[in-house]
Image (cartoon, rainbow, N blue to C red):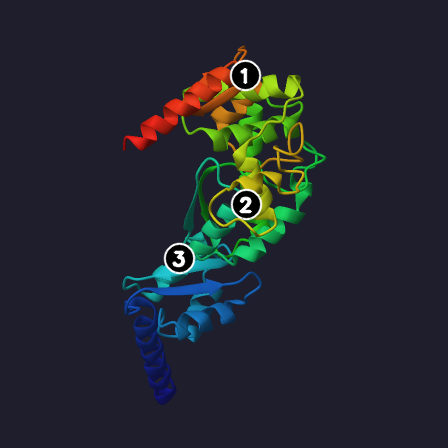
Amino acid sequence: MRRLLTFLLLCAIGLTAWLAWALWLPMSPGGQKFVMLHTGYSTRHVARELKSAGVIRSSEAFVLWHAFHRRPSLKAGEYLFEHGANGIAVHNRLARGDVYVHTVVIPEGFNIFDIAAAIESAGLGSRQDFLKVATNDTALISDLAPQAVSLEGYLFPNTYEFSRAQSMQEMAAAMVKQFRRVAAEIGLTENVQRTVTLASIIEKETAVPEERHEVASVYKNRLTGRVPLQADPSVIYAELLQGRYTGGLHHDDMSFDSAYNTYRHIGLPPGPIANPGKSSLQAAMQPNQTNFLYFVSDGNGHHRFSNNLEEHNRNVAALRRAVAKR
């Protein structure tokens, strides 16, 4: 009996020492280690991934600790380990869901191609996968814009934090959700697609917030008078859709056959050409009351507006003189 007790005591001491080594003794990952834990992984699978990455000392001890500590389930996601930590601290992180997030900055005026490139650059997936969602999952916005041909215009500019455990559809849905929040805030509930389409052109035409209501007035007056909008950004977008944009516009491009080419077709294009911010949406909703039909850059980041072609031509000549003096 004494031998049995001694044996059991030694076993207990050995188990305690092993657990102390496996769970309490910190382990350094040896630099940055990213571990991706997918939804559906069992605790044993999670432990194997952590052990393989050099984050924990023993997968068996990790599983044992989880079994005897009824915490919330371990959360799926991508985790970054770069500092020494023991197995218990690692377990606590996974129970909290302290996942690594990738920051994606979407400036005002980005189109779906720009956003797709930003998603890919952030390491969240391929550009093509995001474009597939952005061009097909119109159900995300169909209640507000039933005629939408893509999510262009409804992926609201903002700074987002996404994890690699999120799907492309979840990321797009987060951007659409932000659009809905802003739309509700400014009272955009009617003629949503028309307003967003106009706002997207305004957004691409000027980066100066105080000019946007005047730019909106130009396009409102042209739409009312059945005058082609002749918006260069719409031609660029038409070529982007066809994969033929080379980084600049030439005279021949203005005759490019596309419903988005506002030189060839009167009225608004079929949908937005970019994702406008709040001030451009407000400008499209409430254009200034003017007689302006034209505007052109003044060469200093602003624009000159005019009521007629003669005045517009003088402004164009002034721009050319200013450029020639540089």
Q: Position of residue 261 (x, y in %)?
A: 62, 37
Residue at point 40%, 24% (across, down): 317
Residue at which label 2 appears: 112
Residue at which label 3 appears: 92
Q: Position of residue 194 (x, y in %)?
A: 64, 27
Q: Secondary structure at mark 2?
A: helix
Of 197 and 314, the residue lying toward us = 314
Q: Is residue 39 above or below residue 268?
A: below
Q: Position of residue 216 (x, y in %)?
A: 53, 21
Of 175 and 269, the residue lying toward us = 269
Q: Amino acid at mark 2?
A: Ile
Mark 3 neighbour density, 10 Å: few (under 14) some (14–19) many (20 or more)? some
Image quarter where the C terminus lies is: top left
Residue at which label 1 appears: 287
Q: Is residue 78 above or below residue 248?
A: below
Q: Secondary structure at mark 3?
A: helix
Q: Amino acid at mark 3?
A: Asn
Quarter of the view holding residue 271: top right
